[in-house]
Image: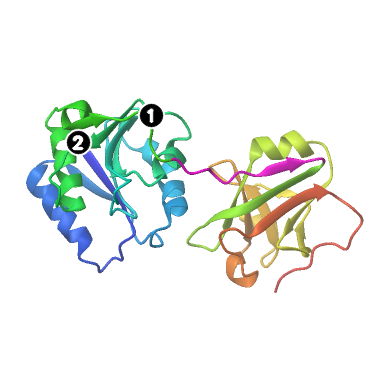
């Protein structure tokens, strides 16, 4: 059974989800249409790319992923079909595709469409054409270059890693861009401090589970994405520490200091 996913910046009560789902139901009978994620912060390409990058490969090969984030193309941007890693992605050439894939795509097609066509019509029609057996190359002209955005990566200096918060989940856990590999490359078998926002908030051990520490204590763990996550057992760390996207996480060599305080 063919699968189409939707990742959008629309609120649950907005009309646009109903519009595109209705179009897809008419044009793609029998397809399973799934809300991969909605209510992405408006125009937030980084947030959307993080969600899609970490979810798309859980769907069957051949899935079509429609991306409705900052969709209105301007004169320099086009509507694209991107084929990569046995999946299809449909969206606007606004820099999101390289953030999702972290590699070169297998094929990029600029979708042919009428001059004044609505982007939702363009996306639904492209999905329908792909499901009917047409190749991406049948639907437009190939492109060699697409717009790229630079991913935000952690930096390594001597005995220091400086990263930042790139995602906050539904529980307020703050996910950083510091990978397990980078962390252990610098600090394996060494004592360290994980500083969050300031020198007053630090962690000196990696936990496996939230419950490894008492309720109210801040902790750090590597999540299922192998990214360093800052949390509080039983509370919302982002609210309590006023963390947001871009907040700094610094890891350096440990020095003598009082044990971390419980936060409540």
Image check: 6 left or right of 149? left
The main secondary structure of the magenta stretch is loop
**Residue 234 visible in the current orientation:** no
User: Please, what secondary structure does the residue beneath circle 2 have?
Assistant: loop
* 200 vs 42, nearest the viewer: 42
Q: Nearer the viewer, mark 1 or mark 2?
A: 1
Q: How crowded is mark 2: few (under 14 residues within 10 Å), some or many (20 or more)?
A: some
Q: Where is residue 205 in the image (x, y as percent from the top left)?
A: 76, 50
Q: Is 247 rendered above or below residue 223?
A: below
Question: Quick one: 207 or 64, which is closer to the camera?
Answer: 64
Q: Distance between the residues labelled 1 and 2?
A: 21 Å
Residue 90 falls left or right of residue 229: left
Residue drawn at x 50%, y 58% is 169
Which residue sits at x=73%, y=34%? 185
Position in image of residue 262 (x %, y %): 74, 68
Residue 2 numbered mark, or none: 2
**Image position of 147 with respect to 16: above or below:** above
Specify the quadrant that holds the N terminus.
Answer: top left
Query: Given the current orientation, which residue lies at the most extreme front position?
Result: 75
Left or right, 264 with reference to 99: right
Q: Would you say residue 74 is visible in this rendering? A: yes
At horizontal 77% and vertical 37% (from top left) the residue drawn is 186
Query: Which region is colored magenta?
Result: 148-158
Q: Residue 129, position in %: x, y?
A: 13, 35
For this rendering, which residue is in front, 149 or 153? 149
Q: In which quarter of the image is the C terminus?
A: bottom right
Dot 1: what SS?
loop
Name the residue rendered at 65%, 39% in the picture.
Answer: 180
Quarter holding residue 96 = top left
Mark 1 — residue?
Answer: 105
Question: Which is nearer the N-term, disc 1 or disc 2?
Answer: 2
Residue 131 horizontal/vertical position (percent): 15, 34
């Amino acid at each position: 059974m063919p699968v189409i996913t939707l990742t959008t910046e629309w609120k649950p009560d907005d009309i646009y989800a109903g519009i595109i789902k209705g179009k897809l139901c008419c044009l793609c009978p029998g397809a399973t249409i799934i809300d991969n994620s909605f209510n992405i912060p408006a125009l937030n390409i980084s947030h959307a790319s993080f969600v899609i990058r970490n979810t798309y490969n859980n769907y069957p090969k051949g899935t079509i992923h429609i991306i409705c984030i900052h969709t209105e193309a301007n004169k320099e941007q086009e509507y694209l079909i991107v084929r990569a890693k046995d999946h299809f992605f449909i969206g606007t050439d606004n820099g999101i595709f390289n953030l999702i894939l972290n590699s070169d795509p297998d094929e990029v097609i600029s979708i042919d469409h009428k001059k004044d066509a609505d982007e939702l019509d363009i996306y639904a029609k492209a999905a329908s054409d792909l499901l009917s057996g047409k190749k991406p190359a049948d639907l437009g002209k190939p492109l060699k270059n697409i717009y790229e955005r630079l991913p935000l990566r952690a930096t390594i200096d001597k005995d220091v890693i400086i990263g930042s918060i790139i995602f906050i989940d539904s529980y307020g856990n703050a996910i950083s861009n510091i990978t397990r590999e980078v962390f252990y490359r610098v600090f394996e078998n060494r004592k360290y401090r994980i500083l969050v926002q300031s020198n007053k908030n630090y962690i000196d051990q990696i936990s496996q589970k939230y419950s490894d520490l008492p309720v109210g204590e801040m902790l750090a763990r590597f999540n299922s994405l192998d990214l360093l996550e800052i949390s509080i057992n039983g509370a919302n760390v982002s609210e309590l520490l006023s963390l947001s996207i871009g907040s700094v996480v610094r890891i350096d060599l440990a020095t003598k200091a009082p044990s971390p305080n419980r936060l409540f």
